[in-house]
Image (cartoon, rainbow, N blue to C red):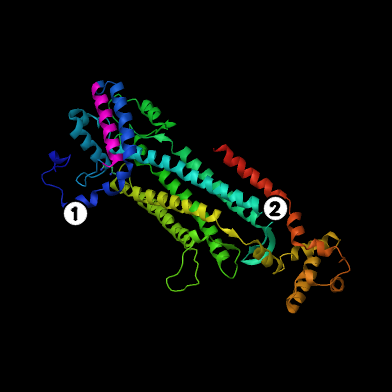
Amino acid sequence: MAKLWAARFGKETDSTVNDFNSSISFDSRLYKEDITGSMAHAAMLGKQGIIENGETEKIIEGLKGILSDLESGKLQFSEEYEDVHMNIEQILTERIGDAGKRLHTARSRNDQVALDLRLYVKKEILAIKALVLEFMEALCASAEENLETVMPGYTHLQRAQPVTFGHYMMAYANMMKRDVVRLENCLEGMDDMPLGSGALASTTYPIDRDFVRQQLGFSRVTDNSLDGVSDRDYCIELTSALSILMMHISRLSEEIIAWCSWEFKFVELDDAFSTGSSIMPQKKNPDVCELIRGKTGRVYGDLMTLLTMLKGIPLAYNKDLQEDKEAVFDAIDTAKQCLKVLTPMFSTMEILKDNMKKAALKGFINATDCADYLTKKGMPFRDAYRTVGQLVAQCVKEDKSLADLTLEEYKEYSEHFDADIYRAIDLGTCVAGRCVTGGPAPSEVERQIGVIRRFLEQRK
Ligand code: ARG
């Protein structure tokens, strides 16, 4: 099949170049956006008298037919045509004749692909956001059920101070909230319609860019044609937002992997969301979490691909830009796939409250509270800190916890100790007392849940 540009060329394209240059294998997924963009463009050409109204109608009808045949599977793209744009234009011309050849008036594939990808990314941002919001609901539900589920909080992976599982989950909800805001900012920042930029220098036809913008639901039109065809900032912003999002769910995955181990046993994954071993009959593995952790690397890779691909490109369009699509698609697909499995896995996970409590009772996570007790009785904090250090050292030597010491033993270290020390170092007291904004006290975590729920509500 002769190329569109055969008139200018003395030879056929080498087959290695054909394969190398072709993007249809991956840009075919832009068919809907391509057709939607072409319909708006054709309507504008007709309205402006650049083509005849009858031709506009033919083009739009033809494009509708192509869309429905593609969706029903009746029509397949051909490898013979380089990309989704050329495939659709070719099929249209085969179906409606000369009117099809007029569609590309006042347009270039450069502004066409810039438009298609923007439309696609806008749609996918909303889909990803919906998945994140769903996961945030699950985090709130779990937090609500675990307001009183005491567990050790860690620093350096050493037991540090008591928190609750609800408090812990709301930390992740806050991370996801920022992810949602990042996605929304990306959407707002990329809402410029590039069609009309032409190949790079716009066009001499009397087009109406604002009409096309309205038809396609953009807030603004791009303000410079060179930038309009070569800007891929929004791809970088999206993959960057997705990298951070993946980093967040990777951290949670890492926690769940640890919590599933016999060493922790804080949670148990539902059988439907675990996998076994081909050799070790006892195994129940958190493969889903490991894959989320692993796939985070892919998304970082996609971000790096885009940053590196773009850094040396002079204005305006260069074919390097065709490499944007696989990276963007992979990041979107990966994030969606991970979120789709994460939410049900998380929601069906059993929380082993007793084991969390047992771990919380060991490891002296109430030592700070013991020091605070002395401080409140008048001892300077640094002295209290040293005194409790000595108490802990004795407990370690005797394999005891702070609650096991008798009042006499306490009094050997300080006269400030009284019978109320036991209440002061009770884990329930330690958690309930941390009721400042951000703290793990059940009433405070309830407030935190309220904040996130209102955030979710505003987005329904
Ligand atoms: N398939 C191309 C891409 O994705 C479409 C634009 C081609 N433009 C060009 N001047 N060769 O970038």
Which numbered dot is residue 439?
Answer: 2
Which stretch is magenta? 54-73
**Depth check, front residue: 262 or 403:** 262
Residue at image coords 58%, 59%: 350
Which numbered dot is residue 16?
Answer: 1
**Depth check, front residue: 375 or 449:** 449
Mark 2 nearby-residue class (10 Å; few <14, some 14–19, many ≥20): some
Q: Amino acid at mark 2?
A: Gly
Give the mark toward the camera: 1 or 2.
Answer: 2
x and y percent of residue 83 in the render? 26, 44
On the image, which quarter does residue 117 sit in?
top left
x and y percent of residue 63 in the render? 27, 32
x and y percent of residue 298 in the render? 41, 57
Q: CA distance from mark 1 to mark 2?
A: 63 Å
Q: Amino acid at mark 1?
A: Thr
Mark 1 and mark 2 lie on one chain; the one further toward the N terminus is 1
**Depth check, front residue: 409 or 186:** 409
Residue 64 lies in magenta, yes or no?
yes
Residue at image coords 81%, 65%: 422
With 105 as the anchor, is 191 left or right in this view?
right
